[in-house]
Image (cartoon, helix red, strand yellow):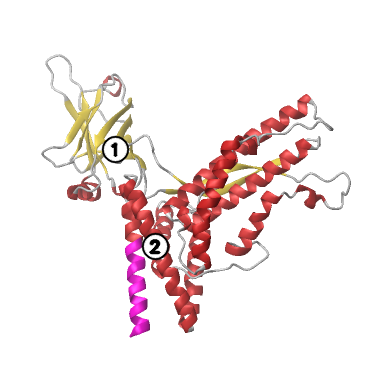
């Protein structure tokens, strides 16, 4: 055997599944976040040489270029799927898993064609939109980075022409308190009313501090733009500005162009600033991302051209269709819904509706993927409500078991995030756990009362 370490890893994972299989057969709950991922080795991306039908050097170069692109595509989707699974976001994990399987199908098509000395498979790119987790991993949970980018058409004080404005920016972040506010200033940029500062400042935050929420919701960061006076002259105030920080509840980054004010009057000048934290205060930042997606076309068989699809399909691509029949739905079949937590479905519905509202408030069209997610949640709620309104005792028992399994899975996730030091994820998961526990207790009272 060429890859002994890979074989040993497969064996360890297989043995680790035995207790889960036994538990599932006995009707006990199984936490899907503990199911190991399929090990991926470099051999999965290697192109075997064909002794009988070798490809030309030019074709070999094209084959390897395609494999490099497919490898990056596959590994990216695999990473996203694993992160969603750890967060307990099953619907997003399944969507990413389908992309993982699709990428592996194209890899198998490429490997099979190369091994048989076939021409390089035809390919094209398509646009795919999917949700991605935005995390600034270089920052700690207690970091907030402020970027002061530039001033735009700043109004100079009386007696100073725009070309003689020597501008700098002071800021104040009132945390941990107004008395202990964090303050600093930029360097002075001379002789322009549209200065480029491009400076950054790392500030300290504490997400669990009682006063921090108040700063985020009502105070924000205050700025003062100054004109540096000459020799023996004091600095003059050009204007002030304030950046509100409420958006950090749902986003890890804010970029704003804010008005420079003179008291309550606008001066016409503006200040461009940016704020970045590791991840949103409320949990994860899901952002729709549209990317180019490489698609390979199946290679027709030379011996039986009437069956090209059978030649192109590999055993590794079969689970995709099986998974679709179990948990998803194809374009030609109706959607399949399963019992889930009403509390979590309503929580997801409210979260998605807040995001849709943000887009509409900014006069932007929401991404189609976000709209489809919202529709899926609404349809799931309607389907489940219709099922449980006329539910038999057996169906109510099944519903209760679903909630019990969710409680166990979420409990394990809370422990995992806590042991990893990921407080925000643990706090978010704990909130979801409490919702399901309350729903379970309510159901048990109704059934026994």
Q: Main secondary structure of the magenta part?
A: helix
Query: Residue 101: where, in percent of width, then height?
Result: 62, 49
Q: Please name whichever residue, 417 or 269, is drawn nearer the observer in this view of the structure.
A: 417
Q: Which residue is mark 1?
A: 144
Please tell me whether mark 1 sits on a helix, a strand or a loop. Answer: strand
Q: Residue at x 49, y 84 (%)?
A: 392
Query: Residue 156: where, in percent of width, then height?
Result: 25, 27
Q: Residue at x 46, y 83 (%)?
A: 393
Position of residue 230 in the picture relative to residue 92 (left or right): left
Residue 296: assigned label: none
Position of residue 355 in the picture relative to residue 319 (left or right): left
Please tell me whether mark 2 sits on a helix, a strand or a loop. Answer: helix
Position of residue 388 in the picture relative to residue 1 (left or right): left
Magenta span: 433-449
Query: Residue 222: where, in percent of width, then height?
Result: 22, 38
Q: Residue at x 47, y 75 (%)?
A: 398
Which residue lies most toward the right here?
303
Residue 408: assigned label: 2
Residue 269 visible from this viewpoint: no
Q: Please name whichever residue, 344 or 442, is drawn nearer the observer in this view of the structure.
A: 442
| 446 drawn magenta | yes
| 219 drawn magenta | no
- For the C terminus, the quadrant is bottom left
Neighbour tally class for label 1: few under 14, some 14-19, many 20 plus, Cα within 10 Å = many
Q: Please name whichever residue, 209 or 194, is drawn nearer the observer in this view of the structure.
A: 209
Query: Residue 159, relative to residue 215: is it above or below?
Result: above
- Label 1 to label 2: alpha-carbon separation: 35 Å
């Amino acid at each position: 055997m060429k890859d002994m370490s890979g074989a040993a890893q497969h064996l360890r994972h297989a043995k680790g599944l035995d207790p889960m299989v036994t538990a599932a057969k006995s009707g006990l709950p199984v936490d899907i976040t503990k199911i190991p991922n399929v090990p991926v080795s470099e051999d999965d991306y290697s192109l075997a040489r064909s002794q009988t039908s070798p490809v030309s050097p030019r074709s070999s170069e094209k084959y390897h270029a395609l494999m490099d692109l497919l490898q990056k595509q596959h590994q990216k989707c695999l990473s996203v799927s694993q992160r969603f699974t750890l967060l307990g976001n099953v619907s997003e994990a399944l969507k990413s898993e389908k992309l993982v399987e699709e990428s592996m199908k194209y890899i198998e098509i490429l490997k099979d064609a190369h091994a048989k000395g076939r021409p390089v498979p035809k390919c094209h790119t398509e646009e795919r939109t999917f949700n991605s987790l935005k995390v600034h991993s270089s920052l700690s949970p207690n970091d907030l980075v402020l970027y002061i980018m530039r001033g735009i058409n700043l109004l100079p004080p009386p007696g100073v022409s725009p070309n003689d404005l020597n501008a700098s920016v002071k800021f104040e972040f009132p945390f941990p308190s107004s008395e202990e506010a964090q303050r600093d200033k930029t360097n002075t940029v001379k002789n322009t009313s549209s200065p480029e500062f491009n400076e950054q400042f790392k500030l300290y935050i504490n997400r669990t501090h009682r006063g921090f929420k108040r700063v985020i919701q009502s105070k924000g960061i205050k700025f003062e733009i100054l004109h540096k006076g000459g020799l023996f002259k004091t600095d003059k105030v050009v204007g002030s500005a304030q950046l509100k920080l409420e958006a950090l509840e749902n986003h890890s980054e804010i970029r704003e162009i804010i008005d420079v004010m003179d008291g309550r009057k606008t001066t016409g000048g503006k200040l461009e600033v940016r704020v970045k934290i590791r991840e949103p205060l409320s949990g994860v930042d899901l952002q729709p991302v549209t990317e180019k997606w490489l698609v390979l076309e199946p290679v027709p068989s030379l011996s039986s051209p009437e069956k090209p699809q059978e030649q192109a399909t590999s055993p590794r691509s079969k689970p995709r269709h099986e998974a679709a029949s179990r948990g998803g739905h194809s374009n030609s079949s109706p959607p399949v819904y399963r019992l889930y937590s009403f509390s979590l479905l309503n929580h997801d519905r409210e979260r998605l509706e807040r995001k849709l509202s943000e887009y509409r408030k900014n006069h932007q069209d929401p991404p189609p993927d976000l709209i489809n997610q919202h529709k899926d949640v609404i349809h799931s709620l309607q389907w489940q409500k219709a099922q449980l309104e006329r539910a038999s005792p057996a169906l109510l028992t099944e519903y209760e078991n679903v909630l019990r399994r969710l409680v166990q899975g979420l409990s394990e996730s809370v422990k995992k995030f806590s042991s990893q030091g990921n407080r925000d994820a643990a706090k978010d998961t704990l909130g979801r756990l409490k919702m399901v526990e309350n729903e379970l207790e309510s159901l048990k009272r109704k059934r026994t009362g």
